[in-house]
């Protein structure tokens, strides 16, 4: 007969007596542990016996709570935002650049069309779009991220949320926006662009216009996609229609109001 004894159903532990100190079955929240897995300190004892080492804050389960808190904070801050458009572009764009001026114009025209403006909250093109929105009297949102080379939110952000994790921040860009306006930018801008294209291609989001502003800048990228990816069969020709290429802020905002629906018509 096996020496293994099934625990009593009322408490999940072994019978009382000497064997009670080494239960054959143990519940750890939603997890059931049996036999050799049932040994080890309880979560409560680990918490209460830790006298300030701080090591627990570097564990993956603790990170899950931090990630959860970022989603809760973001959802709470943006839940009542209303119609909005996310604007992307380089943090390195100089204030004297024509793309900075274009970013300001995009922000201004989006507010005139009834949209809030969401950016990454940093300098460069993001600052420009926030500035245009703020000066026009609209809602100027910044979703910041911990980076070693950026100083934080630009001065034109009225509603700002800072994130530790890129994926939590990127969820907010998509969830609370009706479309993307993408000005010239680097790796971060490309990351947001291709993620948005993938979400539309896979129908994770629908009726989501993506507009590239700057024919000279973005044209060669679209040419490469057509000449290489389409030619190799890794994307379909129709996938190129996921983005629209324009050269002015006016064209970009007109597409947003047509495709995403003008809030003023509601």
Image: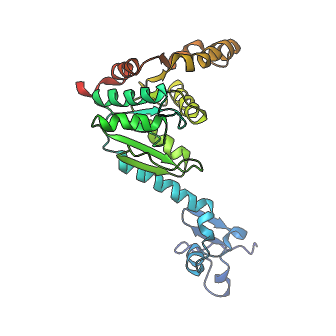
At 36% from the left edge and 47% from the top edge, which residue is drawn? 159
Of the 4 image quadrants, the one containing the N terminus is bottom right
- Residue 246, relative to residue 31: is it above or below? above
Q: Is residue 42 left or right of residue 80?
A: right
Residue 250, given in percent of the width and then of the height, sits at 37, 19
Of the 4 image quadrants, the one containing the C terminus is top left
At 46% from the left edge and 22% from the top edge, which residue is drawn? 211
- Residue 62, relative to residue 215: is it above or below? below
At 39% from the left edge and 27% from the top edge, which residue is drawn? 106
Q: Is residue 19 visible?
A: yes
Q: Is residue 182 visible?
A: no
In the rendered image, the residue lying farthest to the bottom is 17
- Residue 211, relative to residue 17: is it above or below? above
In the rendered image, the residue lying farthest to the front is 96
Q: How many marks?
A: 0
- Residue 141, relative to residue 59: is it above or below? above
Q: Is residue 149 left or right of residue 118?
A: right
Using the image as rendered, state which of residue 65 and residue 4 is in the foreground: 65
Residue 171, given in percent of the width and then of the height, sits at 48, 41
In the rendered image, the residue lying farthest to the right is 1
Residue 33, given in percent of the width and then of the height, sits at 64, 66
Task: State how the image is colored.
Answer: rainbow
């Amino acid at each position: 007969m096996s020496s293994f004894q099934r625990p009593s159903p009322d408490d999940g532990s072994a019978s009382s007596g000497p064997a009670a100190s080494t239960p054959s079955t143990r519940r750890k929240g939603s997890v059931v542990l049996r036999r050799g897995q049932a040994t080890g300190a309880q979560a409560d004892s680990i918490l209460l016996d830790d006298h300030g080492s701080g090591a627990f804050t570097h564990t993956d389960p603790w990170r899950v709570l931090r990630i959860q808190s970022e989603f809760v904070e973001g959802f709470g801050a943006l839940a009542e935002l209303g119609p909005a458009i996310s604007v992307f572009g380089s943090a390195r764009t100089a204030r004297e650049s024509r793309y900075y001026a274009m970013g300001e114009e995009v922000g201004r025209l989006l507010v005139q069309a009834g949209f809030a403006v969401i950016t990454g909250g940093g300098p460069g093109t993001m600052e420009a779009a926030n500035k245009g929105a703020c000066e026009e009297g609209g809602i100027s949102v910044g979703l910041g991220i911990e980076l070693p080379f950026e100083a934080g939110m630009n001065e034109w952000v009225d509603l700002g949320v800072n994130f530790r994790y890129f994926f939590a921040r990127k969820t907010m860009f998509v969830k609370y926006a009706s479309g993307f306006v993408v000005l010239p930018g680097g790796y971060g801008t490309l990351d947001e662009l291709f993620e948005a294209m993938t979400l539309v291609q896979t129908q994770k989001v629908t009726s989501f216009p993506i507009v590239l502003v700057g024919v000279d800048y973005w044209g060669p990228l679209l040419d490469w996609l057509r000449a290489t990816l389409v030619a190799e069969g890794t994307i379909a020709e129709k996938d190129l229609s996921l983005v629209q290429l324009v050269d002015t802020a006016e064209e970009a905002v007109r597409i947003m109001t047509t495709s995403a629906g003008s809030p003023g018509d509601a």
